[in-house]
Amino acid sequence: KNEVEQSPQNLTAQEGEFITINCSYSVGISALHWLQQHPGGGIVSLFMLSSGKKKHGRLIATINIQEKHSSLHITASHPRDSAVYICAASQGGSEKLVFGKGTKLTVNP
Amino acid sequence: EPEVTQTPSHQVTQMGQEVILRCVPISNHLYFYWYRQILGQKVEFLVSFYNNEISEKSEIFDDQFSVERPDGSNFTLKIRSTKLEDSAMYFCASSYDRNNEQFFGPGTRLTVL
């Protein structure tokens, strides 16, 4: 059974700060997803990665397969980045995503 | 940009009643999913659907749940006899391939009284 753990649970930052959210998983996976959940509840896919690093705008996601660990970084954080960030893992041969509990990020102006 | 849509946005029902939650996945996607999120808890997988049949389901997805693709565009989740503990946000998602990014709908908030 794959367990997905995130840290920290809550994160408060000042506008402009560099943010890191961590995710670890317990078994081998085929892909790791980073998702953003807005206060209204909607979920947006940010990244799907199985190795290395991906960048989109101010967001960077990295994964270390050997260490079963992924990080999501936000550079030059902004109040509009305030949301819950969720990592989810899929195992080979399965479409099922196993979700972490999420990291609630608040960026203050 | 294509998106997944869900209706209704909020459904209130009495315990024991049947509800049908509707989703329109992205048109060229082949894999469809239902997830739920009980308030304050993490998102949980319910079921995946491909080629007009269930490809995977979780322990949560028991006999009171069913899914259907009644036509070429809609994907529905039916809960036959709702319980109080079915109150949650239900998300539909779709992907082109099983190993591709999943696109989520805005969710349906189900409240069972």
Image: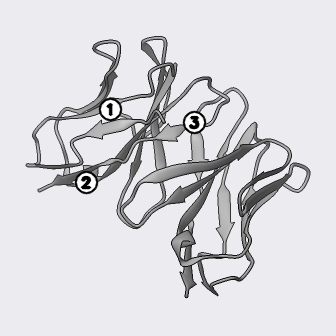
Sequence-wise first label, 1 or 2: 1
How packed mark 2 is, by other alpha carbons closer than 10 Å (few <14, some 14-19, many 20 or more), is many
Q: In this view, does B41 lie above or below B31?
A: below
Disc 2 element: loop
Q: Quick one: B41 or B74, which is closer to the camera?
A: B74
Q: Where is residue B113 in the image (x, y as percent from the top left)?
A: 11, 56
Along the viewing direction, whichever of A48 and B2 lies nearer the viewer: B2
Indicate the position of residue B98 as horizontal and vertical percent values: 62, 26
User: Which amino acid type is marked by label 3?
Assistant: Lys
Question: Mark 1, chain letter?
Answer: B
* x then y, percent, for residue A5: 67, 63
Crowding at mark 1 (Cα within 10 Å: few <14, some 14-19, many 20+): many
Residue underneath mark 1: B23
Say which residue label 3 marks.
A96
Same chain letter for marks 3 and 1: no
Q: Could you say whether the residue bearing mark 3 is in a helix, strand or loop?
A: loop
Look at the image and tell me in which quarter the N terminus of chain A lies: top right
Q: Which amino acid does label 2 sit on?
A: Ser
What is the three-letter code of the residue carrying label 1? Answer: Cys
Please, which chain is the residue tagged with disc 2 on? B
- Position of B56 compared to B109: left or right? right
The dot on residue B87 is: 2
